Image: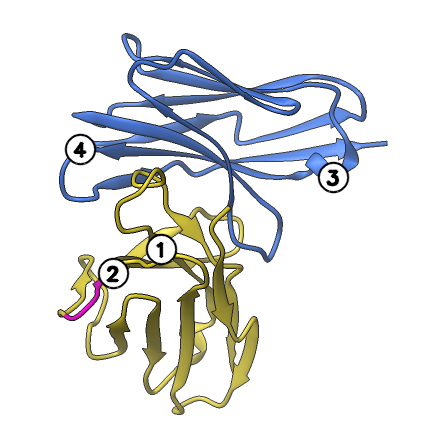
Chain colours: A blue, B yellow
Amino acid sequence: KNQVEQSPQSLIILEGKNCTLQCNYTVSPFSNLRWYKQDTGRGPVSLTIMTFSENTKSNGRYTATLDADTKQSSLHITASQLSDSASYICVVSATGGFKTIFGAGTRLFVKA
Amino acid sequence: GAVVSQHPSWVICKSGTSVKIECRSLDFQATTMFWYRQFPKQSLMLMATSNEGSKATYEQGVEKDKFLINHASLTLSTLTVTSAHPEDSSFYICSAQPTGGVWDTEAFFGQGTRLTVV
């Protein structure tokens, strides 16, 4: 069964601190993995998209890693800011037929 | 980057009426668009896949006669919630998959539409 599991469900950190969000998946055959940031009441915004051959990809203070062997991905946020408070969603797509599985998301709260 | 625009951003309607939500790709063509529903503190749930010029494909449990989808052009898909009831109140989000090009594997989301049925 194709699944995407994210952890933790929610996270509270102090401004300026780093954090890492996890995503484990069982989607097969794997096509790509994406991380999205979703502010409350807004549509998701793409942070990174990774294919099978990519291990690390950065977008500013966001760095995503992918281990296709263990089917795990992480999103590392450096020097967090209050504006980083949002839900972070891991999305994994399978090849052929637009099969896309959404994770439940991690709700991040950055406090001053 | 690619822009997907949804309209309206929010709408309040009376129970029993119908509401139409538009999803437009502003700077690219999208053969395929997706409609999602999101309840508070939950992840996006795919409702249907909309294909230009053909019938939409609905996910299991989604009533196609209640949620009418029309994808009449390569830049516009509409979702009509017919005979809306309070339990249809939710956040509806569309995404569009560019046809070909370097963004072939990426789908871009609209900003969402908050529907409240009273």
Residue A33 percent across, percent down from the top left: 36, 28
Residue at image position (25%, 23%) is: A26
Give the structural element (helix, strand or loop) at label 2: strand
According to the image, label 1 marks what residue? B96
Give the structural element (helix, strand or loop) at label 1: strand
Say above or below: A21 vs A82.
above
Say above or below: B42 vs A103.
below
In the image, what residue type sits under mark 3? Ser
According to the image, label 2 marks what residue? B48
According to the image, label 4 marks what residue? A95
Write down the chain letter for disc 1: B
According to the image, label 3 marks what residue? A83
Write down the chain letter for disc 2: B
Mark found first going from the N terminus, 4 or 3: 3
Q: Is residue A35 magenta?
A: no
What range is drawn magenta here?
A: B48-53
